[in-house]
Image (cartoon, rainbow, N blue to C red):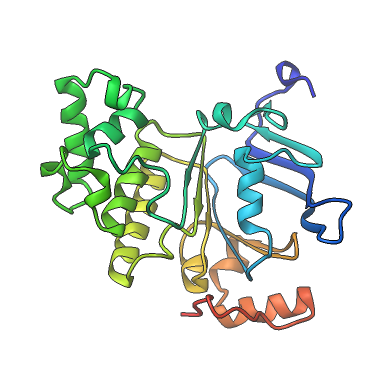
Amino acid sequence: MDSKAMKQTNDMLVLSGISKTFNRGTVNAKTALDNISLNVARGDFITIIGSNGAGKSTLFQAISGAFFTDSGSIVLDGRDITLMPEYRRSKSIGRLFQDPMKGTAPGMTIEENLALAAGRGGWLGHITQKDRELFREQLARLDMGLENRMKHPMGLLSGGQRQAVTLMMATINPPQLLLLDEHTAALDPGAAEKILKLTAGLVEEYHLTCMMITHNMQSALELGNRTLMMEQGHIILDVSGEERSHMTVEDLLAQFKKASGKQLDNDRMLLS
């Protein structure tokens, strides 16, 4: 596809028939994504739920470029990125993981990590006073006292503090697409609630296009404007608007059973 010939549409992300099978041609072959097509509009905040192995994280890996898909195309903001390497996609796609240890350099200070994310070079770069003022201002918004600990190593922070800083790093230069892969799952309930509130605030403030995998079905319905449910490498449910606004967790479970023919069985799922 000729990216120069593409016209900008209201879609920030367009997935067309993407598939991925791991260990292809062996007895361990596993189809993780099966002919998925999806249009994500600019400003969409999509929550994604599904059982373990449904393909949620694999979908994010395909979008971010952790591997190339076997077929189909991925278009971001009118540009075909299907064969673009991950390091180039990372300039436009921000991503947070479940593990608060990922996405940061634990031996570097908070200040250095933020500088690296802001394109200032981090450890070997030159951090100006203006940069420090910006970092301090951003950290103060977290209400965790981290603006007074900018010289502290990231590795000494709690999981919640670290995930909050990582979220700031992912949005300090607002990305075209923000991918959140169960970024609160490893946190205690209080920290998780604070991070979700911060997430919603940043998405709204920067008008971000965001996709968030969550194991909390209530959060999936309360946050954002659209909810997807995945099962066995397929998107089996896509709800938004009036239908979603009146939907309960029980309705969501019933829809899953109707679409998949079975009960949602996952110990990690939080139903309320």
Point out the residue furthest to the right here: 25
Q: Residue at x 54, y 68 (%)?
A: 245
Q: Quadrant of residue 160?
A: bottom left
| Residue 164 as seen in the image, left or right of residue 39 | left
Closer to the camera in the image, 110 or 8 = 110
Q: Quadrant of residue 42?
A: top right
Q: Residue at x 55, y 29 (%)?
A: 87
Q: Position of residue 39 (x, y in %)?
A: 69, 45
Q: Residue at x 17, y 42 (%)?
A: 152
Q: How many marks?
A: 0
- Considering only vertical position in the picture, is 245 above or below 46? below
| Residue 105 as seen in the image, left or right of residue 71 | left
- Considering only vertical position in the picture, is 82 above or below 265? above
Q: Position of residue 212 (x, y in %)?
A: 52, 55
| Residue 179 as seen in the image, left or right of residue 120 | right
Q: Position of residue 206 (x, y in %)?
A: 39, 38
Closer to the camera in the image, 227 or 122 = 122
Q: Residue at x 63, y 37 (%)?
A: 65
Q: Where is the N terminus found, in terms of image quarters?
A: top right
| Residue 36 as seen in the image, left or right of residue 204 | right
